Image (cartoon, rainbow, N blue to C red):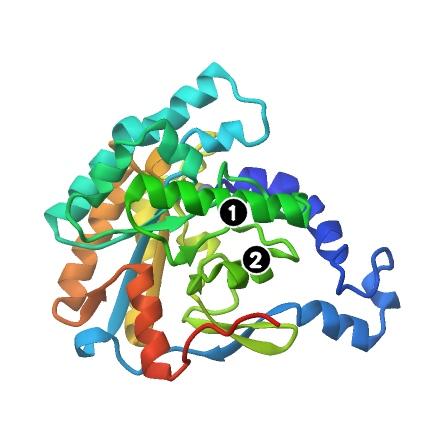
């Protein structure tokens, strides 16, 4: 997730959303819409009932879900304008960052979820062994080449996601059940495609701190949303382009404060990181400090799980049932 790029592209997202077939008004500003039009747009993809459990597996008070978006070279590649320099700094994620992060997780027997654009894994297939060796971590889908869904026609988005699923399954030997949109960028078609492809959870949206059910056009989907947040993402805090600098110890403090509130609320703490961002020597300190803080504050009352395990747990205890096939 690169916030800077997302911000640059943000103006593209709104017209793309409004061009959805369900959108009633493609050009009028909101103040000229009817309330029916407002509701139609808002309800296209919206948070439904909370799936926050009263406790986590084993009676734990708080859940910690760590995710790594293994973007590497797909960030400079996706717009078709890579340079030697941007590719090299992105390759750092595969060559150095990932191994350093996985060693930290494995030394503490902490599971995590790895959302990988399949091009990223095809360029460095050895990452599957690095991640998969412990048998503790999850592989999940993060697009084909970190494409921005809202800029794509339905057919292209659908084809890229199908290709990503086929390739990631072949490269990892497991069929992913979870999806995270590259740059957290949802098109008007994304949810329909995810439902048709049989995904069981989604993790790109920000309507809550706790898991919730996604609604489509006001109707239940049976799809679990594990919400993310820019505050809980290493990329904007560290600013990998180097236009500003944030001390990794200050980054750790933001995450510790987020964890402390999740602990108070008996909630979920979901953190997104990137090997090419957090895998640097000085920056992995932020994750080390966070894990030490959690160990000190919440030993015996914290549950670490993959996103898939968390999604299935809340699905079960909430009585959500299976994902509902789209009409
Ligand atoms: Zn990403």
Q: How many marks?
A: 2
Mark 1 highlights which residue?
161
Q: Nearer the viewer, residue 308 or 47?
A: 308
Q: Locate residue 11 relative to residue 131 in the image: left or right.
A: right
Residue found 27% across the figure and 35% down from its top: 127
Element assignment for label 2: helix
Q: Residue 53: tell me if it is visible.
A: no
Q: Badge 2: how crowded within 10 Å, few (<14), some, or many (20+)?
A: some
Q: Badge 1: how crowded within 10 Å, few (<14), some, or many (20+)?
A: many
- Where residue 309 sits in the image (x, y, percent)? 28, 65
Quarter holding residue 294: bottom left
- Where residue 67 sits in the image (x, y, percent)? 33, 51
Element assignment for label 1: helix
Labels 2 & 1 near each other (Cβ < 8 A): yes
- Where residue 120 sits in the image (x, y, percent)? 40, 33
Q: Nearer the viewer, residue 16 or 301?
A: 16
Mark 2 highlights which residue?
193
Quarter of the render that holds ligand 1: top left
Q: Is residue 320 above or below residue 269?
A: below
Residue found 68% across the figure and 46% down from its top: 153
Label 1 CB-ligand 1 distance < 8 A? no
Q: Locate residue 155 relative to residue 274 in the image: left or right.
A: right
């Amino acid at each position: 997730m690169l916030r800077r790029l997302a911000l640059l592209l943000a103006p593209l997202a709104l017209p793309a959303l409004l061009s959805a077939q369900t959108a009633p008004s493609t050009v009028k500003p909101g103040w000229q819409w009817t309330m029916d039009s407002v509701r139609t747009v808002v309800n296209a993809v919206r948070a439904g009932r909370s799936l926050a459990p009263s406790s986590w597996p084993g009676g734990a008070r708080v859940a910690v879900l760590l995710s790594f978006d293994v973007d590497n070279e797909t960030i400079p590649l996706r717009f078709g304008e890579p340079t030697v320099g941007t590719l090299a700094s992105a390759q750092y994620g595969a060559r150095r960052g990932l191994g350093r992060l996985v060693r930290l997780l494995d030394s503490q027997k902490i599971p995590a979820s790895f959302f990988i654009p399949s091009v990223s894994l095809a360029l460095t297939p050895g990452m599957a062994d690095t991640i998969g060796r412990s048998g503790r971590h999850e592989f999940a889908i993060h697009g084909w080449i970190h494409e921005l869904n809202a800029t794509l026609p339905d057919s292209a988005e659908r084809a890229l996601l199908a290709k990503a699923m086929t390739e990631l399954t072949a490269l990892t030997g497991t069929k992913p059940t979870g999806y995270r949109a590259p740059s957290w960028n949802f098109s008007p078609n994304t949810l329909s495609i995810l439902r048709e492809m049989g995904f069981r959870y989604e993790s790109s949206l920000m309507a809550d701190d706790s898991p919730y059910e996604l609604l489509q056009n006001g109707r239940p989907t049976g799809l679990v949303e594990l919400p993310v947040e820019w505050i809980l993402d290493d990329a904007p805090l560290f600013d990998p382009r180097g236009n500003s600098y944030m001390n990794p110890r200050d980054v750790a403090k933001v995450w510790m404060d987020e964890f402390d509130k999740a602990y108070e609320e008996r909630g979920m703490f979901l953190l997104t990181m990137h090997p090419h961002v957090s895998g640097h020597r000085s920056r992995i300190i932020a994750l080390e400090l966070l894990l030490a803080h959690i160990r000190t504050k919440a030993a015996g009352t914290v549950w670490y799980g993959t996103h898939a395990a968390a999604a299935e747990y809340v699905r079960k205890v909430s009585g959500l049932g299976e994902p509902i096939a789209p009409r």
